Amino acid sequence: MAAYKDEQSETWYISFHYYDWTGKNCRKVKRGFKIYAYDEDVKWQLAEPGALMSTKAYRDKKALPFVEKLKEAVKNLTIKCVQLAEQSKKMTAKVDGQQKQISRLTDKEKKVMVWLCAKIVAETEE
């Protein structure tokens, strides 16, 4: 799954392909993800040090809390990504199982057609 930026609307969208239960290749697109919260919001930017602030004070009061906030955001995104990957694997397995069932049904239909043809031929020969 890939993410793309829509330059006209200044939003992001994701697009991916999958095979539905019939085996047809389908495309799914979700649009309108605004990422300004991470891009322009003040709470997601590292503050400038004050004029009389020491390096240690800046690190302890500004940089470390900001880094912790970023680590938490990355952790949450990683968890969500893993959950979506697992969900995708389950859906793929389910689709594969349904495709096998469809192929089995198709094989049964072929056998029934052969049987019916054989029966019709046998009746016409009598």
Image (cartoon, rainbow, N blue to C red):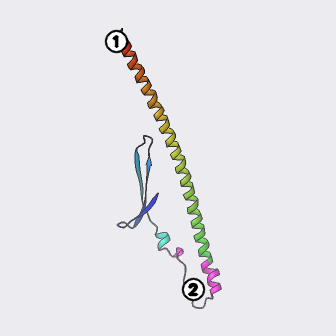
The residue at 52%/76% (across/down) is 45
Does residue 5 appear left or right of residue 45 in this picture? left
The x, y position of residue 94, in whole percent, is 52, 42
Does residue 122 appear left or right of residue 77 in this picture? left
Examine the rendered structure and indicate whether residue 103 appears above or below residue 10.
Answer: above
The residue at 60%/80% (across/down) is 62
The x, y position of residue 120, in whole percent, is 37, 16
The residue at 55%/78% (across/down) is 46
Using the image as rendered, state which of residue 19 and residue 73 is in the foreground: 19
The residue at 52%/39% (across/down) is 97
Examine the rendered structure and indicate whether residue 69 appears above or below residue 84.
Answer: below
Write the start and end of the magenta stretch as one range: 40-63
Which image quadrant for residue 29? Answer: bottom left
Crowding near pointer 2: few (<14 within 10 Å), some, many (20+)?
some
* Kind of element beneath mark 1: helix
Does residue 4 appear left or right of residue 97 in this picture? left
The x, y position of residue 69, in whole percent, is 59, 71
Using the image as rendered, state which of residue 110 and residue 51 is in the foreground: 110
Instruction: Check disc 2 and report the residue beneath it.
Output: 49
* Kind of element beneath mark 2: loop
Instruction: Check disc 1 and report the residue beneath it.
Output: 124
- Residue 114 belongs to magenta span: no
Does residue 109 appear left or right of residue 81 in this picture? left
Q: Report the amino acid beneath label 1.
A: Thr
Outermost residue toward the bottom?
52
Crowding near pointer 1: few (<14 within 10 Å), some, many (20+)?
few
- Label 2 or label 1, whichever comes before in sequence order: 2
Disc number lying in front (2 or 1): 1
Outermost residue toward the top?
126
Which image quadrant for residue 65? Answer: bottom right
Q: Report the amino acid beneath label 2.
A: Pro
- Residue 44 belongs to magenta span: yes
